[in-house]
Amino acid sequence: MYLGFSLTPFGHHPAAWRGAAEIANLGFEALLAQVARAEQAGLDFVLLSDRLGARPVDDLSPVATPFEPTTLVAALATRARRIGFLAAAATHQHEPYNLARRFASLESISNGRTGWVAVTTGNGEDRDREYVDLVGALWDSWEDDAFIYDKEKGRFFQPDKMHVLNHKGEHFSVRGPLNVSRSPQGKPVLAQVLTDENRALAAHAAEIVFLQSSSPTGAEEAASDFIRSLEAADRRRDARILANLVPFIAATQTEAQALHDALQAVEDISKQPLSGAILIGTPIAIADSLQQWLEAGQIDGFAILPPTLGMADLFLAEVAPELQRRGLIGRTKAGSTLRDYLNLPRPAYPAATWERAS
Amino acid sequence: MSGDRKMRLGAFLMAGGHHIAAWRHPLAHAQAGVDIDHFVALARIAERGKFDMIFVEDAAAIRERNSDMASQAARSTAFEPLSLLAALAVNTSHIGLVATASTTYNEPYGLARSFASLDQLSGGRAGWNLVTSASELEAENFASSGLRPHSERYERAEEFADAALAIWDGVEDGAYLPPGGADFTDRAKLHPVHHRGKHFAVEGLLESPCSPQGRPIMVQAGASDVGKELAARTADVVFAASQTIDEAKAYYSDVKARLAKYGRQIDDIKIMPGISPIVGATEAEAKAKYRALQELIPDAVGVALLASYLSIQDLSSYPLDGPLPDMPETNLIQSRQQLIIDLGRRENLSIRELARHFAGARGHWQVAGTPAQIADAMEERFSAGAADGFNVMAPIFPSGLEDFVTLVVPELRRRGLFREAYEGRTLRQNLGVGVPAKR
Ligand SMILES: Cc1cc2nc3c(=O)[nH]c(=O)nc-3n(C[C@H](O)[C@H](O)[C@H](O)COP(=O)(O)O)c2cc1C
């Protein structure tokens, strides 16, 4: 079972901040402390979501961190070195070259522990597909062994292992190459939050999809649908399908239910942008549900969206160790990249069909 | 000279070193460009020396079109500056963090937001070196239409700067409320941006609280007339490249003279020209260090670097031992082109000599000598109205920076020219530039 942990200053529930004591929760050190606990608990990655545009005036929700996700990942990655990071970034907010470069840089900083959650808008499917393919091609600007650092001969890299794209598409025109070497894990991992609009693109390119279904049965259907889309796109079952999960956890079932009801009475969670299936119960009950769900169906794991920080702590301190005991989580092979953590293949360098650099 | 005026110092970081051949030197770490631990170590050395800031340059492209030439220099793989400085921010505590970013290939909201993020991560130590990006290779990574004219790039830069400042100023100090109350933010202290201009439309608010330093520091390094005007209007710090003290003084007084027009004081801008110090126990040792680096430059690489700053494609077709040919004014970095032409004429240098000289620090001032000699040279310019401080460009990292911090900085301190301890925790406090009035 693969597990991601979605990072927020107060918890995912829009009412969570009301019960949170500290404005310092917004700060880097507090967020790092959460990441360190997730790392300690053996989770595979931290997820940083993002909103699509500038913050609208009428939405002052305290769910988002004060940091732009990719810069936050850069900072976190130097201080937590055994967990991966997925950061959301929208295709409408960045030039492809800048985005490819930012993530390539994160890969250097983290030694290959990052991924991009591609936020697409759905109303420009061709543009999004060209964008995503272009970013992938920029990440392949350099062959793995291009840089040789030969001081004696004065050769920093092998010129025939650098590839100029000269991409001239309908929407973008990019010469390349990227000015960052190929990632230690080949490429950053590409993820998408699955929607009706981006299904085809995700089936084409995503290596992780997050399902937002509000119930386990809904998630199962979404997973089966997506697997069919993968087949239609001529792909093997080579993507990780993770269900978003909002676990309301307490020492007793009654207490968990009461906490859930109290939060929902303040603000209804269904308005949340990144939603998932709600589970309510004790740590053991939550672990049972995750196990049953994993064993029964098509899901490879979960993205945990803790409603409050207290519940985040309970998940990490009690649910995760229970999953460990049952042998459901825990890394099975050596390796230090996000791909290693997720047992995703390292993408081979594409057969160099591009024109050689001039 | 007023007794308590202190020099500002920036550590201009660059992978293996500023010297074009530094990476080949036995002391250099050839893979430095993408080694985060190397950069953390450099930032800590600079912080130990109480530098005001570290500075990283940028280009959204490789630097050289000809791949054979590019492959003989170390500049084709590097960190992207904002992510690099974000990583350094949480591994340092006092030093300022200045990243170069282009107004030509970014959008105001996204860029202002990334700098706000860096500013929050560092507790108020972020700065933005605003550039307009003068290379064709960059232009080709963003559009098929080629490099936009100098005037158009600056027109966009002017609007960009205004939009970015408005975005930063949109959240007042105290806008985020302590928990426990009915609201998360005080809406009276939030001023969403409604910018509609020729180049951008920006609506909305930053996700972060007010900058711990009031607003990130603005840095400018353009040397054309419009560049200096933009600096006079918006910058807190100006970087410059100058060879002689007279050039430096002329530039200094030119920029300072423009301030009054914008209701600003002489001290509101710190002018920090680049200096590449080659430190030796004796002058002979310093000169020998410099020679050792010079010997590592392949001629073709030096000439290609020179040509790229002159924006000439085929300098190699001229006799290397002859003078520079006459050339048309460039759309690229006009000031650096002029600097090269002047240098060549003044010192009567051939293309080969000029290229070798230029390869040391890309046109910046190079001084090889003992710590006292280097301090003398810096003091002379500092006292003569040619500089408020310097952007220190070690020829080779980490040793060149280490040498400067352990040998030259104490010498500057003995003379009362440089701080013993940081004055504050934010870059603005340490630079001693006030918080600008919010718009
Ligand atoms: C110390 C220094 C550093 C600079 N760094 C960069 C840089 O990293 N990227 C860039 O595009 N331009 C850089 N420049 C160039 C300028 O910022 C400016 O964009 C260029 O000089 C063109 O404007 P101008 O014609 O006004 O000089 C630098 C200049 C100086 C003096």
Image (cartoon, rainbow, N blue to C red):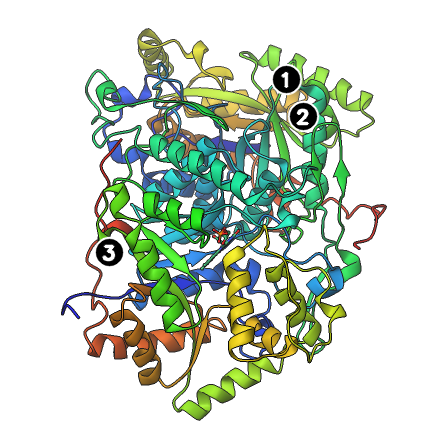
Subunit of mark 2? Answer: A
Q: Amino acid at mark 3?
A: Asn
From the image, tell me which residue sits under label 2.
A128
Q: Are marks 3 and 1 on the same chain?
A: no
Residue A309: horizontal and vertical position, in percent?
Answer: 35, 28
Q: Is residue B248 above or below residue A19?
A: below
Q: Amino acid at mark 1?
A: Gly
Between residue B103 and residue A5, name the one nearer to us: B103
From the image, tell me which residue sits under label 3.
B430
Q: Give the quarter of the figure containing the N terminus of chain A.
A: top right
From the image, tell me which residue sits under label 1.
A122
* Left or right, A222 with reference to A143: left
Tag in front: 3 or 1:
3
Find out if the beta carbon at label 1 lies less than 8 Å from the nearest ligand 1 atom. no
What separation in Å lies between label 3 and label 1 (alpha carbons)?
Answer: 47 Å
Subunit of mark 3? Answer: B
* Left or right, B341 with reference to A257: right
